[in-house]
Image: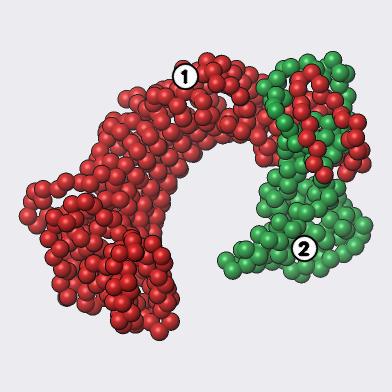
Amino acid sequence: MNFFFFVTMQKQRIPSNFPCNAELEVDKISNLPAQIVDKILSHLSLRDAVRTSVLSSKWRYKWVSLPNLVFDNQSLLISSQDQTFIKNKIVNIVDHVLLLHSGPIQKFKLSHRDLQGVCDIDRWILFLSRGSVKEFILEIWKGHRYKLHSSIYLCQKLIHLELFNCLLKPPLTFIGFKSLKSLDLQHITMEQDAFEHLVSSCHLLERLTLMNFEGFSDLKIHAPNLLFFDVGGVFEDINFMDTFNLAIVSIGLYVNPGFDKNLTLGSAGNLVKFFAHLPRLQRLEVQSFFLKYLADGKVPGRLPTPCDELSFLSIRINFNHLDECLAALCLLRSSPNLQELEMLARTEEQSALRTVASVMEENYQNCMFNQLRHVKIAGISGLKQELNFINFLLANSPILERMTVKPASVDGAWDMLKELLRFRRASVQAEIVYLDP
Amino acid sequence: MITLQSSDKDVFEIEQSILIQSGTIKNMVEDDFTFIPLPSVDTETLIKIIEYMKKHADKTDSKEKNIKEFDKDFMKKTLNELFALVFAANYLHISSLLELLYPSIADRIKDKITEAIRQIFSIRCDFTPEEERRIIMDNKWAHEGTEIEGTLD
C-alpha cells in the first residue's frame, strides 16, 4: 500500500486512515549501541538522518556522531532558480551541520550541482583540517576552478582525495599526503612541479585517476605502490618510474600528437620506454590517440621483456597508419598470455593522404596466443590491414572461443564478410559473430 | 566440531571452519573451547546465523552470484528478526552479516515521515507539540520537501 503525504512545516499530522502497524512491540532501535545506530544512519541520506532528531528525546542527537557527511543533490533539496538564494541555503546547511556535529568526521563530500567555488568552502576545509578526515570529495559543478584552501594540504590522515573543477597550488612546505591511497583529479589545474611532487610524495598511493587536466603536460609517475592508473587528457609525454606493481592502466590521449621523428638515432622509442617499468601489467587500455604516441620512435618486433601478466588489452587504432599497426603488432607479439583483446578502429580525415603501406608478412610469423579466448574488432571498413590482423589472430589462437566483428558502416561489409569466411581458424570452437554496424 | 548452545538450551554441532567467520567464536576456539554457550542468542536466531555462516563459508568465485541471491533473500525478514540478528551478529562479531543488516534496517527509515518511523519501530514520542515544533525549526532544511512517499512494509 502506498500513501502520498504532502508535508509542510506547519502541518505534520497523521492522516486519519493511518493504520496502526507496529512491527516491533518493543522499541528495540532506540537502545542500540551508538556505533550500530551510526552505521544504520550512515545508509541514509543526510536529510533522513537529521530528521531522526525529532523521533524522540533519545534520538535528538543520535545523528550528530555520523562519521560520514555527504552534502549532495539528494541531501540538499533546494528548489529555486536564484543563485544567491541557493548558495546561501547550502552555506547555512553545511555550517549548521558542522556546528552541531560531534566526534570525528571520516568522510566529507560536497557535490551540489548549483554550488560554485565560494570562499565558504575555505572555512569548511580549515575546519576539517583540524580533525582527521580520511575521505574528502569536492565537486564544483558550476563556475571557475575553485582554488583549494591551503589547509587541505595539512590533512595528513587523508586516504582518498577526489576533486572536480579545482585548482591545486600546494605550498612549498607541503610534504605530501602520507596516508593517501587513492587520488582522483578531474578537470583540475596544477603546475608541472606541483603535480610531480604530489604524486611522488604520496608514498602509499595505489590508485590514480587523472582526467582533463591543465597546467602540466609531462606525466612523470613516480609511485612504487601504484596498482591502478587511469588518465585521459592532453599531454606530451608519459614516464613511469619504479611503478613495478602497476596492474591496471588506461590511457587516453585526447589530441593527435604531431611528431617529427626527431629522436636521436638508436634511442628507444616511446613503446619500449613505456613498458620498461610495467612488469606486472594485467590490464591495459590504449585509448584515443595514445597508440600514435606509442608508435613514435623505434618500434621493435617485440618488446625486450614480454608482458607475461597481460591478460586484457584494448587498443584504439588507426589501421591506415603503418606505424600504429607495427606498434600494435609489437604489443601483441609481446603478450603471450593474453586472454581478451579489443581492437577498435579510429578513422581520421587525413587517412586518405597516407601511404597505405602493408605490414610485411614476416611480422605476422612466430606468434601464438595460447590463452586468447575472446576478441572484439569494431569500427573497421574492410581494409587489407584490418583483414590481415584478423587473419593473423584467427590463425594463431588455438583456444579462441569468440570473435565479434562490427564494421563501421554497411559499405563494404559484405565483401569483408566474404573475406572473413575464408580465413583459417586454429581453434575448432571459434565462433565469429558479425554485429550490425 | 564445535558445540554451540542457545539461550533456550538447544545445542548445535558445527564444523570449526564455518564458525570462524564469527570473531567471538574464533577467539574462543583459539583458547581451546569446544563448547560455547550463547546466553544472549535464542534458538531461532542461532539457526539463522548458522544458515548464514554455512552459506558464506564457501567463497569460491563461482558461488559469488549464488551468495548474493541468498543474501538478498536472507534480508527479507520481519523487523523483529532483523533486530535479533543485529544483536546476535554484533555479539558474535560477524561483520559481513552486520554490513548486510545495516542498510536493510535503514531502508525501513528511508524517505518516511516521522510518524511512520515511530509506528514501525514502536518509538514513543516524548516531546510536547511545542518541543517538536522547535526541533523541526532547528533543522528546518531537513524537514522541507515536496511529496514524501510514506509506505508501510
Q: Quadrant of the C terminus of chain A?
A: bottom left
In the rendering, which numbered label is found on residue B51?
2
Residue type at tag 1: Val
- From the image, state the color of chain A: red
Q: Give the drawing colour for chain B.
A: green
Give how far across and how far down residue B104 sits, in percent. Answer: 73, 47
Letter of the chain that mark 1 sits on in the rendering: A
- Which class describes the residues within 10 Å of circle 2: few (<14), some (14-19), or many (20+)? few
Q: Is residue B93 left or right of residue B80?
A: left
Q: Which residue lies at the image location 39% right of the left edge and 24% below the top edge?
A: A144
Q: Label 2 is placed on what type of residue?
A: Glu
Viewer-proximal residue, A141 or B9? Answer: A141
Residue at screen point 59% across, 18% down? A89
In this rendering, would B143 be left or right of A196? right
- The answer to which of A332 and A113 lies nearer the viewer is A113
Residue A356: horizontal and vertical position, in percent?
15, 63
Horizontal and vertical percent for residue B34? 79, 64
